[in-house]
Structures are given as C-alpha cells and as structure tokens.
Image: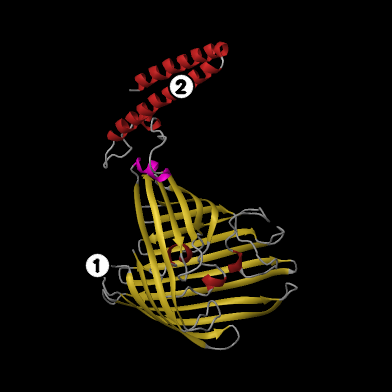
Amino acid sequence: MFLYFQKIVVSSTTSLFSIKYFQMKKNNFHIALSITALITFSAISFEVSVAQVKDTLSKTNESNNLLEMGLEDLLDIKVITGEKGGFGKQLEELQFNTYLHGYAAGWFRSNDLNRRKKSKTYSLQYFNPILGVNVHDKVVAEVMLEYEHGGGEMGIRYGIIDYSPFKFVTLRIGKFLMPIGKFNEYYYPEYINLLNDRPISHWQIIPSVWSEIGAQLRGNFSLTKKVLVNYSLFVVNGLEQKDGKYGSDIRNMRDNFRDYNNDKKSFGGRIGILPVAIIETGVSYYYGTYSTDGKENLSLVCIDAECKTSKFTFRGEYVDAIEDTASGSINKNGFFIESAYRLNLYLEPVVRYDQANLPNVTGFDKIKNTETIQRMTTGLIIFPEPKKVSRFSFKINYSIVLNDGNGSSANEFILQCAIGF
C-alpha cells in the first residue's frame, strides 16, 4: 500500500509539473487544466488515505491497542478532510482508555467559622466531574472541573499531564494540587475528609484547596526492604498578593494563573518516609516572592504525620509561614490533630482539634495584635451502603469554638451528604 501510494505521488507530481510547464505557453486554458489535475490528485490521495486508515485501524484491537503497531503505521494515520466529527472523533480512532468519575457534597450548616460568617443555609458545596485518559502505561492526563455552590462559573481545580519514564519518577505538568503537607493534596475532598470543614490552619495559612501552575517531579522508591520514601519537587508561578498590601491574607494570593506582575518563580517540595506500612511522616517547604513589586518573600514549612490501620486513623499537620514586609516579618502558624475509629461497617466517630495564630497587620505593616483561633470538633460518619457504595456517607459535625480570635466562643453544626463516584 505504501509503495502504491508513492507511485501515485510521483506520477501525479510529475504530471503536475508537466502541466505547469505547458501552462506557461497556453495561458488561461491550461490554468484550468492545472487546477483539474490538482483536484484529481487530491481525490486519489483521499481514497488512498481512507484505505490506509481502515487498514491501520484493523491491525489494532482492544487488547493490544497501539502497542503492536509499527512506526510506519502510526505515522500514516492522517486527518481525513470532509469527514464527520472534530478533534475528539479523530482521537477516538486511537482507542485510548478514558474514564469519568467525580464527587459531590451538599450540606446544611448553622455557622461558618472559616469564612467568619454566621448564617443558617443549605448549600450544594461541590459537584465536580473528573475526566481522564490512560494514553499509555507511562502517560496519563486528568482534569477536575469545579462547580461550587450550585451556581456561578465552572473552574478547573486541577488539570495535569503525568509522564512516568521510570517507575520511581513522574513528570507532572499543568495545574496541580500543591504537595504542602498531605491534607491539601490527598484528604481535602468532602467524601474523603473525616470532617465537613477544613482545619483553620489549612484555610488561612495553607490555603486549601491550593493549586498552582508549573512543573513537578514526583515518585517513590524503597530505601530498604521495609522503608518506603516518596518525594515531590516543584517550580510554579506561586502565590501573589491581590490588594498590593504587604502581609495580606495568604488565601487571597491563590489563582495566579499567569505572572503578569512579578515573574519570579516559586519552588519547594515534600519528602515523606514510611518506616512501616501504617506510619508516614513528611516535611514540606515552599518559598517564593508574593508581592507584585517582587520585593517581599513568603516561606512555608509543614510537618505532617499519620498512622492508619484498617480501623484506626490518626493524623496531624503543623504549618509555619513567614511573610516579609517593608518593616519586618510576620509569622503565622497553626496545626490540627484528628483521630477516627471505624466501629463497624456503618459507623465511624471522629474528633479533631485545630488552632491558628494569625497576626493582624495595620496599614503600616505593623502587627496590631495576634488572633488565636481554637476549635474542637466531634463528628460521626454514617455509611448507609458500605458494601455497595463505599464512598457514600452522611456526616454529622458539632464544633465548639473555644476562641474565635476575639476571645469569644461560638459553635457550629453541620450535616453533610457526600459521595465519590
């Protein structure tokens, strides 16, 4: 087939040059003749291309997909002019393994300490589809679309391309969840989170959910027969202030999709160690310039630990942030510890204590005072169909706010339904 196509190309090209030469002598009549020859050549090429694609696709099946195709066959797959469908239809011919998942969460709450709002309300917190494709055993692409509160615009929580040339390393490109601690990258989704709210330390200091655009190297390997090590190293656009005020709220520095003002990149990573299968400890670091003028820096250090068995879970994280200002540095820190025990297939009680120390900054970058926010939360996770839908649950949370930052106490009640599918 390939030799036959070559003969057509050579003979048709020769004819076209002959016609062009004749055209120089015979003016308009031969212009039309030249166009006719070109159309004829295109029609022949189209028929051959269709035959080639059919022949190429017939060589594949669902089990071997593209793995047994030769280089010549792969390169001969062409876009067929005039066919139905668009880019998706063309890519479908390659028979990639695609998947569709997602999660949803709705709740009723009586208070919102993290947002400092007192309101009794229902909310469809999230309904987020996750689309992905296994392009190859070494290449995966995945995106999570975010639709929050049942209204407003849809965004992208993360969109990643992973390439794993070796078992111990993966190159990740795109918008990814930041590997600062484990909660932001692995435990924040409502169907996984043991409680309905995120810890205050991971709302104000680690601004979960926190995604950045850049590049990352990640992976894991065995240090010994029993000790496993995992790592993440990244370079990203980084957090950037929105209000032009030094020492501003870290949470408001997210979503710096393009570096229009300060183009200095941020960097960092995390390393985790599992001395035994049920215990993991890790250290994370982030450093970057956060001010639009490129003068002031922000650094974050996080220490995390976790112990998990089939029934028992204990985890905690401590985070410390230093924001540079024109008149000095501002220190913000906080932590959370939580524990849960699976009584049976249907019930899992949870308890968490979280705290954050947040300085108030004046217009002259001076620390006015420091707010200490303390909260104790108890909860119960109910799994109504544990054998059929393991990621479907109802959560009942009651929080006692020991200190709301102003020396006052309060309470929160949240009832949530969450599912991962």
* Quarter that holds the C terminus: bottom left
The verdict on residue 88 being magenta is yes
How far from the left and from the top, in percent, is residue 392? Answer: 32, 70
**Secondary structure mostly taken by the magenta-highlighted segment of the chain:** helix
Foreground: 323 or 132? 132
Foreground: 4 or 309? 4
Q: Residues within 10 Å of mark 2 (few under 14, many from 20)?
A: few
Question: Circles 2 and 1: CB distance less than 8 Å?
Answer: no
Residue receiving disc 2: 36
What is the C-alpha distance between the residues marked 2 and 1? 65 Å
The verdict on residue 205 being magenta is no
- Spot the residue most to the left: 387
Residue receiving disc 1: 388
Quadrant for residue 46, please give it.
Answer: top left
- Type of amino acid under label 2: Thr
- Type of amino acid under label 1: Lys
